[in-house]
Image (spheres, helix red, strand yellow):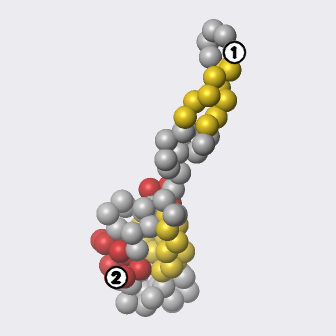
């Protein structure tokens, strides 16, 4: 994919986008996760398993008294699914970009 950019001098030229890069130049997320907070028990296995630090536990307990997991840095997710594999409650779904 190419993006037209205007140079400092002269007409617009085509700039080549790198794989995994959106037109704004920022890296595109490679994966996305969804955590079912209603069944998460806050065991922290997903937090420890995630190599990119995408998941953290809430600071306040939920209605059942658990510190549920939540995704806080989704842009760093690679879609590796280590978090989902570690979850004993099967509370995490992962989608990886192709």
Q: CA distance from mark 1 to mark 2?
A: 53 Å
Residue visible at 51% across and 89% down? 39
Label 2 crowding class (10 Å Cα cut-off): few <14, some 14-19, many 20+? some
Q: Is residue 12 above or below residue 30?
A: above
Q: Position of residue 43 (x, y in %)?
A: 35, 83
Direction top: furthest residue: 9
Residue visible at 36% across and 82% down? 85
Q: Position of residue 44 (x, y in %)?
A: 35, 77
Q: Earlier in the sequence, mark 1 or mark 2?
A: 1
Residue visible at 35% across and 74% down? 82
Q: Is residue 78 above or below residue 48?
A: above
Q: Is residue 86 left or right of residue 22?
A: left
Q: Is residue 55 above or below residue 75?
A: below
Nearest the camera: 87 or 20? Answer: 20
Residue 48 badge: none
Quadrant containing the N terminus is top right
Q: Which residue is label 1 attached to? A: 11
Residue visible at 67% across and 29% down? 4
Q: Is residue 71 visible?
A: no
Q: Which residue is label 2 attached to? A: 86
């Amino acid at each position: 994919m190419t993006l037209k950019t205007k140079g400092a001098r002269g007409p617009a030229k085509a700039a080549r986008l790198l794989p995994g890069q959106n037109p704004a130049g920022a890296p595109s997320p490679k994966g996305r996760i969804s955590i079912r907070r209603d069944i998460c028990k806050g065991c922290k296995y997903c937090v420890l398993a995630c190599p990119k630090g995408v998941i953290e536990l809430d600071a306040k307990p939920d209605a059942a008294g658990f510190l549920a997991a939540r995704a806080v840095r989704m842009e760093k997710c690679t879609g590796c699914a280590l978090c989902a594999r570690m979850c004993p409650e099967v509370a995490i779904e992962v989608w990886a970009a192709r």
